[in-house]
Image: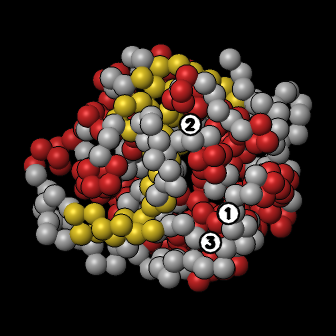
Amino acid sequence: MLVGSPSGASVIIGTEFNEKFTRHRLRRNHNFRAWAGEFPAFLPKEVENIKDQFARNLASRIERLPVPLSLTNNDIMSSCVKPKILGKTSPLVLLHGFDSSLLEWRYALPLLEEAGLETWAFDVLGWGFSDLGKFSLPPLPSYFLKSQSHAALLTVCYSFPQFWSSYIRRPMTLVGPSLGAAVAIDFAINYPEAVDKLIFIDASVYAEGTGSLSRLPKAMAYAGVLLLKSFPLRVYATSLSFKGLPWNTCVDWTNIGRLHCLLPWWEDATVDFMISGGYNVSSYIQHVKQNALVIWGENDQIIDNKLFVRLHCELPNAVIRQIPDCGHIPHIEKPAALSKLILEFVQVDGQVNIPAGVACVEKV
């Protein structure tokens, strides 16, 4: 089944999507803060310069919750967006991609909430807006060191299981876009009781970690990370990822995408991830027991589409869906089409519950 705009149709993203969905929300008399004036004090001050109404609204909802760590007496303040409603189905937990934050869900999360899903957005430790200022890992058990990278342990063996047991406490549908799919697989293998279903979006799960980057001298690694943080490189990457994006929108989306890079510990955390080896989960895939949905954008220029077919074949219990006229980030490019696929998969009361006013935002 193909879901999305008809072939040749224009992609409704950015300003046009904002305007249509904002009008829809206002017509339904929701308390939608299109221009939220208050942001959490821990966010970089540059958040005030963001113009995207959905990014501002989601940023205003970010919280830091204390998460106890199992091998230390300290808590880490982990950043997330809590759900507005408690649903009858498994909670939906949204991860994000490489060097990103939960703000990449700014368009799709409101749609999922409006459809009645209990939806959490979680920042992967090391990126996003968690407080790493006073955080240090204790010594690790030897059996972890043999099988997993230091970077994977940050999330999979420390913050995320404790976050789940402290706040979610029920089997969840875990959504992993891009590198977040590797995080989701790693977590599902180690904590199967916590995961009911899995959704992979343009999954990056076959890379062998960070490869040769793990062998860089630290000085060179820091130089590379500074380049990764630079505005010119980020705006160039944004322009390549989203064809035909107006310049003002491209600049604004770049500012959204690099906001977490402005936190003082971002450079250290990213270098640690790079040198640690990153995620290498390809050998885990065939052992995933949960039902899974594999979603991929037809025009993804980052991941070869053959790998999505391979993932579908190697997962024991999976279905695959394609979104036409869409690149690597469907939750930004085609949020309504993606939300419809998610809703069909989780089966809210056995029906797809996309509100009529939202369904018309994109031709689905």
* Residue 136, image x, y percentages: 24, 71
Mark 3 highlights which residue?
230
Residue 12 at least partly seen: yes
Query: Label 1 amino acid?
Result: Asn
In terms of secondary structure, where does tag 3 sit?
A: loop
Instruction: Indicate the quadrant where residue 138 lies.
Output: bottom left
Residue located 79% across and 42% down the image: 357
Within 10 angstroms of label 1, few (less than 14), some, or many (20 or more) residues?
A: few
Work out how far the residue at label 3 is from the one at label 1, CA to CA, in angstroms.
36 Å
- Of 190 and 38, which appears nearest the observer? 38
- Of 85 and 122, which appears nearest the observer? 85
Residue 364 versus residue 152 in the image, above or below: above
* Residue 24, image x, y percentages: 80, 51
Which dot, 2 or 1, sits closer to the camera? 1
Residue located 28% across and 78% down the image: 134
* Residue 349, image x, y percentages: 53, 27
* Residue 81, image x, y percentages: 49, 60
Residue located 47% across and 19% down the image: 318
Mark 1 highlights which residue?
31
Query: Residue 201 got which mark?
Result: 2
Query: Label 2 amino acid?
Result: Ile
Residue 35 versus residue 22 in the image, above or below: below
Q: Report whether 194 appears left or right of 53.
A: left
- Of 154 and 267, which appears nearest the observer? 154
Which dot, 3 or 1, sits closer to the camera? 1
Query: Label 3 amino acid?
Result: Ser
Instruction: Indicate the quadrant where residue 352 lies.
Output: top right
